Image: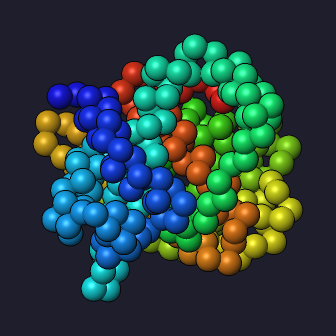
Amino acid sequence: MDDDGLVFKALADPTRRLLLDRLYERDGRTLVELEAEVPELTRFGVMKHLRVLEQAGLIVTRKRGRHTHHHLNPVPIWQIYERWIGKYRARQVTALLDIKDYLEGNVMTTTTVSATQVYQVYIRASQEQVWDAITRPELVARFFFGAQVEATYEVGSRIRSWSPDRTQQWGDNTVLECDPPRRLVHTWRSLYDPEMAAEPESRVTWEIEALPQGFSRLTVTHDRLDASPRTAASVRGWSYIVSSLKSLLETGEPLPSLEE
């Protein structure tokens, strides 16, 4: 079964959709917390559903202390959106849905944005190719909204980024760890928005794992967002970024601009 098939199969079950909804509302839950959401199921039953979701790439688990935390990974859903909806003029579809919600008086459910967000994607490219994509300025610009980046990636050095026309500084961050081609860790503060710039800096970790048959698994973790709620709400854009990186490496072209 292809990747889309695994995702559609996982989403076909109402219990699995419920678990994803609960993680969307509050990410990073433990097994015990998720069990409480479906009391009619045994622990084994909940674990079975979570295993299907993990195989489809819809959740990523992280061990912290004695507990395993489950994080929603929206990247596979974003990729399906791009393949099956985006090309059918999604902006017009979204506008019609917004009008429908307004006329019917629908209100979006309030969500609690997680202080740790995890995004994972499988890429048909080597570990070295993925590393080049996240560290070579000319490649970063192609999948990261045209960002103009200056960096040496030495530990303690700075990563500075500007808008495509270099009229606005987007970021000024510090490299915390650098282990080519496996791991890059740096601070994060968004300077293009005054309110986000005033928040405490957070942290971004890029992990690249080499897999058989020329594949790599890229995991981007954005954490330390506890005291930076505006930044936490904005960084869900990682779904588009890692999907665009995947497209660039596999096809030679990034995803279309979100403005198109």
Between 102 and 112, the one nearer to me in the picture: 102
Write the residue at 69% across / 68% down.
229
Image side of residue 20 versus residue 112, left or right: left
The residue furthest top is 88
**Residue 222 in view in this figure:** no
| Image location (x, y in percent) of residue 237 | 60, 46
| Image location (x, y in percent) of residue 157 | 58, 69
| Whether residue 253 is situated above or below residue 160 in the rendered picture | above
The residue furthest front is 40
Q: Quadrant of residue 181?
A: bottom left
Write the residue at 46% across / 46% down.
74
Image side of residue 85 versus residue 104, left or right: left
Q: Quadrant of the N terminus?
A: top left
Write the residue at 72% across / 60% down.
190
**Residue 191 in view in this figure:** yes
Write the residue at 47% across / 59% down.
22
Q: Quadrant of the C terminus?
A: top right
| Image location (x, y in percent) of residue 36 | 36, 72
| Whether residue 57 is situated above or below residue 35 in the rendered picture | above
Between 120 and 55, the one nearer to me in the picture: 55
Q: How is the image coloured?
A: rainbow
Between 83 and 156, the one nearer to me in the picture: 83
| Image location (x, y in percent) of residue 211 | 18, 46
